[in-house]
Every structure is written in structure tokens, then in C-alpha cells.
Image: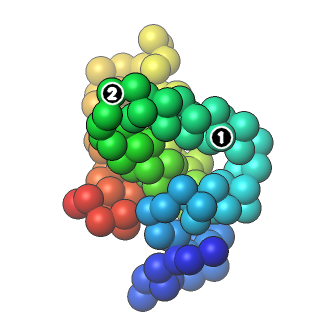
Amino acid sequence: MSAQPVEPGEGSDVLIPQPAMTREALREAVRHIRPLNLAQYDRELGEAFDQAVRTGSIGWMRTFLIKWAMFVAVERRPARAAALRVAEQVADDPSSSDEQVLDAQREIAGILAAAEKEIGLG
């Protein structure tokens, strides 16, 4: 798997280095960290390819690669992935207070901003 080196300060909380943003490298990363998501990855890759051919636009493939690079950037760090799931649950819970929802939304935004930075978008 072609990958970027582990960032300074990254420790044992990182399952794999952030891979290159290619379909092969991302598929291998998904296979390694979340194998149950491989079928979804393959299905969405096919859909993105079909849309790209149909429309003559590579934007579909770029969107696909960004989505899955973000997925890997989050999931390759189990603590980050767990924090995202908890924040999403709080944000979606109708019994959460406004303050809890805002805190959860800030947590989600911070996690996604860190992931964007790791894949070179931030």
C-alpha cells in the first residue's frame, strides 16, 4: 500500500499511515481497517465511474476519492472514530440539550477538519 509516513507525534493510536488518495491505496486501507465496508466501497466506486462516464466529468471520481480518504483518515485512528460516533449520536439524539448538540457539532467539525488536513484539503 502506497502511503504517507506516519506524522510526528502519531503513536500506537494509528492503525495505518494515511494512504495516497488513489482507489487502490484507499481500497487496501479500507480492507485493513474496516473490511465490512469493502462492499460499499466497491459499489460506490462503480457508481462514481459510471457517473463519470455518463457525464464526461471526473468530478464524480474526485468526490469518491475524497469521501473515502476522509473515511480512512478518521477510521485509522480508533479513538478519533469512536469520538466521532459518540458526537454524532449526541447530535442526533432528540433528548440532547442545545448546548450538548452544539458541543457535539464542534467536536464533529474538529474531527473532520483534522481529517481534511491529513488528506491535504485543509
Q: On the rendered structure, is 35 left or right of 91?
A: right
Q: Residue at x 76, y 42 (%)?
A: 36
Could you say where residue 51 lies in the image, as x and y percent from the top left? 43, 28
Any mark on residue 55, and which?
2
Q: From the viewer's perspective, is the residue at label 2 or at label 1 nearer?
A: 2
Q: Residue at x 46, y 20 (%)?
A: 92
Q: Quadrant of the N terminus?
A: bottom right
Any mark on residue 1, and which?
none
Q: Residue at x 63, y 33 (%)?
A: 43
Could you say where residue 56 lies in the image, as x and y percent from the top left? 31, 34
Could you say where residue 117 lies in the image, as x and y percent from the top left? 30, 64
* Image: 33 above or below 57: below
* Image: 94 above or below 45: above
Label 2 neighbour load within 10 Å: few <14, some 14-19, many 20+? few
User: Is residue 44 visible to the viewer in this orientation of the structure?
Assistant: yes
Label 1 neighbour load within 10 Å: few <14, some 14-19, many 20+? few
Q: Look at label 1 and name its amino acid.
A: Asp
Cα distance in 3D space between marks 2 and 1: 20 Å
Q: Which residue is mark 1?
A: 42
Q: Look at label 2 and name its amino acid.
A: Thr
Q: Earlier in the sequence, mark 2 or mark 1?
A: 1
User: Is residue 74 visible to the viewer in this orientation of the structure?
Assistant: no
Q: Quadrant of the C terminus?
A: bottom left
Could you say where residue 62 lies in the image, as x and y percent from the top left? 36, 47
Specify the quadrant of the image occupied by residue 8. bottom left
Determine the secondary structure under disc 1. Answer: helix
Count of residue discs: 2
* Image: 13 above or below 22: below
